[in-house]
Image: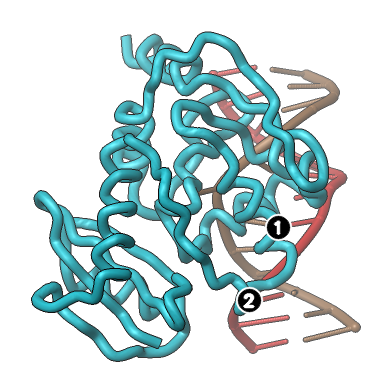
Chain colours: A cyan, B red, C brown
Amino acid sequence: MQVYIKKIGNIWFGFACENQKVAATNFGSDETKVIEGIETSLGFNASLTMDSKLPEFAEQTFTALNDIYIGKGTTSSIHLDLHRLPAYTQRVLKAVARIPVGYVTSYGAVAEAVGGGARAVGNAMANNPLAPIVPCHRVVNAALGLGGYSGGLNVKYNFLKREAKGFAEPKNVPLDGGMLKVFPVEFMLSKLEKKQL
DNA sequence: TGCAAACCATAAC
DNA sequence: GTTATGGTTTGCA
């Protein structure tokens, strides 16, 4: 297992991989916290490579991570290594990965699509080792409020603001198991602004 | 609004 | 096995 980190703009990105498959990611303004977060997700330490001489594959992955971070979404597909995670968690993460940029859904809706309960989905999000590739920030509570976020609620909020694409209608995303209802992120943003008044 | 009770997969004992 | 723990939800005052 190999860990790479790199600073883009003013935030650090990092990820752990093996055979060009990504097992854990992290991001934030504090370099050491990013590294620690990855090690916590993995459950063990891996050798670290700083941003001086990165292989092509790593550069591409960082570009994709930054694209997601700035709200652009990603077109290049990153290969994920989920086999270490419990089966149910994998199902949840795969479903969440299908939520398009500019939309959000609720813990309950995800639970309906993959089986299980809303709280279990929340747990899977809380332990998501692959943020923001698996866009757990696009999962909110049933009232279209923010819900929670390991990286801090303001981080989640800013993510969603950057991802607003001006969509007007809810829609359904086809999933292996069923359908996932998603709502334009504007639905919840306007609701939050109202609350602040 | 606010509170209490049901819900469900995991991790930790 | 059992218990404790959440990024929840729903129903009912």
Above or below: residue A30 compared with residue A55: above
- Mark before the other along the chain sequence, 1 or 2: 2
Q: Is residue A140 above or below residue A63?
A: above
Residue A169 or residue A28, whichever sits in front: A169
Question: Residue A18: percent from the left, percent from the top?
Answer: 44, 82
In the picture of the structure, the residue carrying the numbered disc 1 is: A91
Which quarter shows the N terminus of chain A?
Answer: bottom left
Up the image or down, B12 lies above or below A145; here it is below
Give SS at disc 2. loop
Q: Amino acid at mark 1?
A: Arg
Residue A151 at x, y = what percent?
35, 53
Question: With respect to residue A53, does A128 lie above or below?
Answer: above
* Residue A173: image location, x then y, percent: 68, 32
Amino acid at dot 2:
His
Q: Nearer the viewer, residue A28 or A195?
A: A28
Chain containing mark 1: A
Frontmost residue, A116 versus A163:
A163
* Residue pictured at 55% horizontal, 24% vertical: A144
Question: Front-most of A129 and B6?
Answer: A129
Chain bearing mark 2:
A
What quarter of the picture does the C terminus of chain A occupy?
Answer: top left
> Residue B3, located in which quarter of the rendered image?
top right
- Which residue is most to the front? A56
Tag 2: Cα neighbours inside 10 Å, few (<14), some, or many (≥20)?
few
Residue drawn 41% across the image and 51% down it: A76
What is the C-alpha distance between the residues marked 1 and 2? 11 Å
Is there one chain holding both mark 1 and mark 2?
yes
Q: Which residue is mark 2?
A: A83
Residue C5, quarter of the rendered image: bottom right
The reply to whether dot 1 and dot 2 touch (C-beta < 8 Å) is no
